[in-house]
Image (cartoon, rainbow, N blue to C red):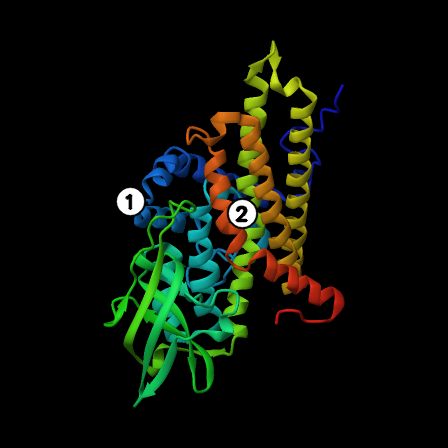
Amino acid sequence: MSDPRVTPDDLLGIDDLLSDDERAVRAAAREFSRRLIAPQIAEWFENGGIPTMRDLAGELGRLGALGMHLRGYGCAGLSAVDYGLTCLELEAGDSAIRSFVSVQGSLAMYAIWRYGSAEQKQQWLPAMAAGAAIGCFGLTEPDHGSDPGSMRTTARRDGADWLLTGRKAWITNGSIADVAIVWARTDEGIRGFVVPTTTPGFSAPEIKHKLSLRASVTSELVLDDVRLPASAELPTAKGLGAPLSCLNEARYGIVWGAIGAARTAYETALSYATTRTQFGKPIAGFQLTQAKLVDMAVELNKGLLLALHLGRRKDAGTLAPEQVSFGKLNNTRSALEICRTARGILGANGISLDFPVIRHMANLESVLTYEGTVEMHTLVLGQAITGVAAFR
């Protein structure tokens, strides 16, 4: 007989490692996901968008999820672990929701919070924390994804102003954003700019025909001699290290979020296997099915332990970028494999949107790639191990 302390949803007793406050934050995010995301997400995914995204942004603001790990300016100021648990529960609903939160809080808001002027912070952060203003982050370009240092978008001085010209691609929130954080090459190196999306010369056509992250708004950013005052520059963002530090914040949330998607797939497969009868008994009673469920549970629990370990290090101020790469590399790969295994357990039903598995599986193909591909994070860790850079 199994030990009653060992349960299918927490084989290792990881819950014991969380404080009461952390469990309360997780419970609030889980309830949000189940109440506001789960009932409609299959339809949103199938139709290719969330028609009530601005309303949902306001709800996320009331939850405290937007910039929740930042302090001041209406942000919740909670811990990295709290933020991670929230990302997990939101992505258990859908990767598009966690992506929105990551871009809003860990990219756009974080860039302003860390590198912005007092005026920029006061103008944008309170509204963004409330979900009343939406942000996006323009770094990736059509020809420069993994190599952002080769970006072609430029900013040149014209009197006291800046003129921005270029294109960005695969920008989450772009078409619905009120403000874009745009990175451009200048005569003084790479700089960041706070660009209101109503500025003449700025446009953000939405990217269509996606088969992954379908509920998420993904856009191009087109900058055609966008004129900005000198005050639009992020004053302390100097060089490529500034946008990369923002990406590291977002990658941390992905470490947790991917586990949420994987957990939903695992729970769905387990429930299905215990009720689907073939050859006179539930398929959970067959050894091959049990082997799949065990492999899924082992990887899920390992990934959650890794995320929690990195969260504790982040809260202690000891988290290194290479360790975030470790988490992003491992947890996205493991989560995708869990979803693929779950799809197999569900058989033909696994490809139906009546079940969440194929949706999470398709979404994770994007999550695996964005914020650093498998190849890039492998090379980051390879350099950490060998001391030799192999990027070029």
Q: Residue 104 falls in which quadrant of the image?
A: bottom left
Q: Is residue 133 visible?
A: no
Chain-order first, disc 2 or disc 1: 1
Q: Residue 112 falls in which quadrant of the image?
A: bottom left
What's the residue type where badge 1 is placed? Pro
In the rendered view of the protein, which quadrant contains the C terminus? bottom right
Residue 77 in the image: x percent, y percent? 51, 58
Residue 210 in the image: x percent, y percent? 38, 48
Identity of the residue drawn at 43% across and 30% down: 352
Residue 41 in the image: x percent, y percent? 39, 37
Q: Is residue 99 visible?
A: yes
Read off the residue under disc 1.
51
Q: How many marks?
A: 2
Residue 385 in the figure: left or right of residue 186: right
Residue 179 in the image: x percent, y percent? 33, 65
In whole angstroms, how far apart are the C-alphas of marks 2 and 1? 23 Å
Question: In terms of secondary structure, where does tag 2 sit?
Answer: helix
Q: Which numbered tag is attached to residue 257?
A: 2
Residue 80 in the figure: left or right of residue 136: right
